[in-house]
Image: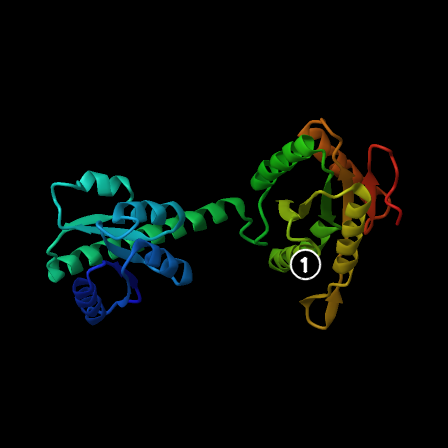
Amino acid sequence: MDANILIVDDDTAIRDAMHEFIQMSGYVSHTAESAEDALGIIEAQPIDVVITDILLPGMDGLELTDRIKQTHDIDVIVMTGYSGDYSYEEAISKGASDFVFKPVRFEELLLRLRRVLKERRLTQERVHMLERLKRLSITDGLTNLYNSRYFYSQLKAEVERSNRYNHPLALLLLDIDNFKKYNDSFGHLEGDKVLVQLGQVIKSCLRAMDSAYRYGGEEFTVILPETEGAEAATVAERIRAAVEELRFNPVEDAQVTITVSVGVTEYIRGEELAVFVQRADKAMYQSKDSGRNRVSCLFSSQQGCGF
């Protein structure tokens, strides 16, 4: 069953008996005689469910529950022998998953523990599914880069951050040269292989803070936070050179190369997002018009890339 259970009770006889029963039921059991000891165990190893008495020396079980739920993804079952002093609602308000009265019938406790673990598993599966759906919604299915919809969302956030903190921000726009001809000659399946490989090359040339996107068709874009234009041009040239080194075999006994034209620009404080993107696009078309397989830059100072 692979679940780690922590029993917290200052009564040695109850704690030991419950520990033995939990172990016999197929779970990994740990014990603590105080809330402070329990918190130490939780920090040291993974725990799925805490079963705690309310009355403990020092910090009580409700405060322990509150502390656990504030900082850990752990379910808590609260026990008490004083039904008049503590209510179910009070325990649940602290984040407890269940509430049982002493003397505890172990068979009943096991049923409640299994229910809590089942609900925990279902919740985790639901969270994982939602995370997967979120990833799918922002990811290009072919290249595994982010998609264009997510690009605009992230670029907007980076532009706002650049304006707020006055940090530089750069943008690259790349287009595969003569890609229609490649598709017409070798077919779209071979063209897809180029797109996948290009996505991998782009990612390999970036830092952790940078992000790459399939902008549409054979166009890609890269957001470079905290990056000035000259540094962005260096990144662009690194990508261009790496792509030029790629070799493809769309037909037997023939190696084919591809190249990319890249546009580079740096954000001008206060300008509209659309203007920023259009300038990168214009720089990319300058590379196309200048013979392809090159990097072109458009900065506010009108300086070139230096390549």
In this picture, is 290 found above or below 198?
Answer: above
Which of the pair 220/165 is nearer the observer?
165
The scheme the figure's colours follow is rainbow
- Residue placed under numbered mark 1 in the picture: 204
Q: Quadrant of residue 36?
A: bottom left
In this picture, is 255 found above or below 219?
Answer: below
Q: Residue at x 82, y 49 (%)?
A: 292
Q: Residue at x 83, y 32 (%)?
A: 300
Check disc 1: other Cα within 10 Å, few if <14, some if 14-19, many if 20+: few
Which of the pair 227/142 is nearer the observer?
227
> Relative to 152, is 66 on the left or the right?
left
> Relative to 211, is 257 on the left or the right?
right
Coordinates of residue 260 in the picture (x, y in percent): 76, 51
Coordinates of residue 65 in the picture (x, y in percent): 30, 48
Residue at the farthest front position? 58
Q: Name the quadrant of the N terminus.
A: bottom left
Which of the pair 202/287 is nearer the observer?
202
Q: Residue at x 19, y 60 (%)?
A: 11
Label count reads: 1
Coordinates of residue 243 in the picture (x, y in percent): 74, 58
| Residue 12 visible within the image | yes
| Residue 96 visible within the image | no
* Element on which disc 1 rests: helix
Q: Amino acid at mark 1?
A: Ser
Coordinates of residue 268 in the picture (x, y in percent): 76, 31
Q: Residue at x 31, y 67 (%)?
A: 2
Which of the pair 49/2 is nearer the observer?
49
